[in-house]
Image (spheres, rainbow, N blue to C red):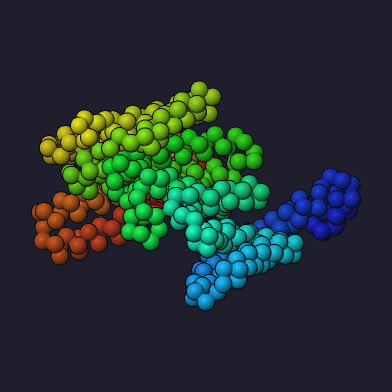
Amino acid sequence: MSWTTQQALEYWQKKGLLTAKKAQELRSALSDDTHMSEHGMPRAVSIFATIGAILVGLGILLFIGSHWTNMTPLLRILVLLGGYCTVALSALATEKRGWGRTSEALWLLTDIVFGANIMLLAQIFHYSLTYWQGPFLWMIGTLAMGYARQERVHAYLAVPLGILALGWIDSGPGWFMGGQMEFLGSSNNILPVLSLLGMALIFSSILTKTTARWDFLSEAMQRYGMILAIIPVLISTIDISIPQEMFSMGGTLKQYIIIVCTYGLSALVFWKGMVVRSELKAYTLTALVLFGILLLQRGGQSIVGYTLDTNPLLYFLYVLVVFAFSLWGVWLGMLIQSAKMFNIGIFATAVIIVIQYFSWTFILLDKSLAFILGGILLIVMTIFIEKKRRSVLSSFDS
């Protein structure tokens, strides 16, 4: 007997084998895969819908801002609540019509409008929520939406909001007061412990992956964690003075809490046996040890940073260690067939090569010649890396 997809789904619903919601999800998935996946349309729809939602959110903020001073407090509140309700109802309407990707973009827009409403309502009632409390409450609302929707896109907003709230605690003035970037440039804030904070996010992603309702957070925490873990170390290879400036700690309570939580989460993950491969265990433990060594302090200075700053040969060896660690990540990504880890390792390796090229050629060559040769090197390197990356990734099990 030959049935269409629609007939099969209706039959399974009548038999009680499928819920209406699950049938709709299957119908949407089949529609995407059958008609559009060949041309990459589902992802394009999501990207354009998300960009559209962000543009609408910015437009709403600009509209409210341009008329804000002419509104009474009551009218301001009604406009804010009306805007939020309009976006939420639009998301609900598109969801009921089966436009899943557009609907999810609109649900993301409700997160954006929610955050704007927090700040603007705080201004109306003269609360100081433009400091760390603002992004913290915004994060809570975004997490609630992500938990209810079980969609990863909300996590990609919630995680940086959490990092921002953490950085802004005891960080000086809040938004529009000139101190909003202090937390990324102060030895008393999260700058020295950014790599460990990244590791904490990675371990948290492993833990959340084991819980069905919080799994939506796992991917975002892992990706942000990888970025935070590697970027400070890569930056430290630019100049001999940077490790001292970047890894010297002021010894604040927040810094010690981050350190304790990171190593506590790592102990929990390893104790529960959530990292199975011995090679991955060795890599992770080595990273934790290296980050810990960089934070060894004496007299308010990083011991390693001070030593490297006074000894060029040791700094050169430090760069080699970071380079070797990046290559180890590439090898490990190939071994465990992790595209994310492989790509991160390739990125880190390429960045170190580029940094060291310009560091040495600016000293040894004329700057114009250095730029020309650097451009040629980058073009050749990107072609080689992309060919090898595609070759390796195509060999991974799907």
Viewer-side residue, 298 vs 124? 124
Instruction: Give the mark count.
Output: 0
**Residue 158 position within the rendered picture, expressed as x and y whole percent measured from the top left:** 52, 50
Viewer-side residue, 375 vs 290? 290
Above or below for 217 versus 55: above
Instruction: Tell me the residue at 19%/62% (across/down).
Output: 371
**Residue 262 position within the rendered picture, expressed as x and y whole percent measured from the top left:** 42, 32
Above or below for 187 versus 94: above
User: Is 237 left, or right, of 145 in this rendering?
Assistant: left
Locate the C terminus by quadrant.
Answer: top right
Above or below for 389 versus 255: below
Instruction: Tell me the residue at 17%/36% (across/down).
Output: 306
User: Is 335 left, or right, of 152 in this rendering?
Assistant: left
Q: Is residue 233 visible?
A: no
User: Is 305 left, or right, of 128 in this rendering?
Assistant: left
Viewer-side residue, 379 vs 55? 55
**Residue 327 position within the rendered picture, expressed as x and y whole percent measured from the top left:** 33, 40
Q: Is residue 86 visible?
A: yes
